[in-house]
Image: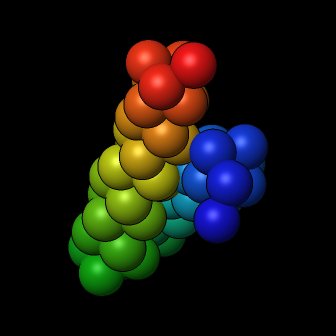
Amino acid sequence: MSSTSDKAKGLKDELVGNIKQGVGKVTGSDKLHAEGVLQEKKGQVEKAVGDTKDAVKKAVK
């Protein structure tokens, strides 16, 4: 996966995670809220992977 793809997927997961957290909070669903937290964290990791790939590409040039 390219760094741009990693970053885009990470951003999507962060957004969906935030939405799940909000819906879980409003509906009182601890499970949905927890899923949202995990998905947001997953997105942050994916974005970090993309940033790392970019840094490696720049260092190699």
Taking the spot 68% from the left edge, 54% from the top edge, the residue there is: 2
Q: Report the number of numbered marks.
A: 0
- Residue 9 lies left or right of residue 28; in this view the side is right
In this view, which residue lies farthest toward the bottom?
A: 31
> Of residues 2 and 34, which is closer to you in this image?
2
> Of residues 45 and 13, which is closer to you in this image?
45
Whether 40 is drawn above or below 29: the answer is above
In this view, which residue lies farthest toward the front?
A: 61
Taking the spot 72% from the left edge, 43% from the top edge, the residue there is: 4
> Of residues 47 and 53, which is closer to you in this image?
53
Taking the spot 64% from the left edge, 65% from the top edge, the residue there is: 1
Whether 12 is drawn above or below 50: the answer is below
Residue 51 appears anywhere in the view? no
- Residue 21 lies left or right of residue 61; in this view the side is left
Please state the horizontal and vertical placement of residue 52, each as a whole percent of the image. Answer: 41, 34
Please state the horizontal and vertical placement of residue 43, each as a whole percent of the image. Answer: 47, 53
Colour scheme of the rendered structure: rainbow
Whether 26 is drawn above or below 31: the answer is above
Residue 4 appears anywhere in the view? yes
Q: Quadrant of residue 7?
A: top right
Please state the horizontal and vertical placement of residue 41, each as a whole percent of the image. Answer: 33, 52
Q: Quadrant of residue 3?
A: top right
Quarter of the C terminus within the rendering: top right
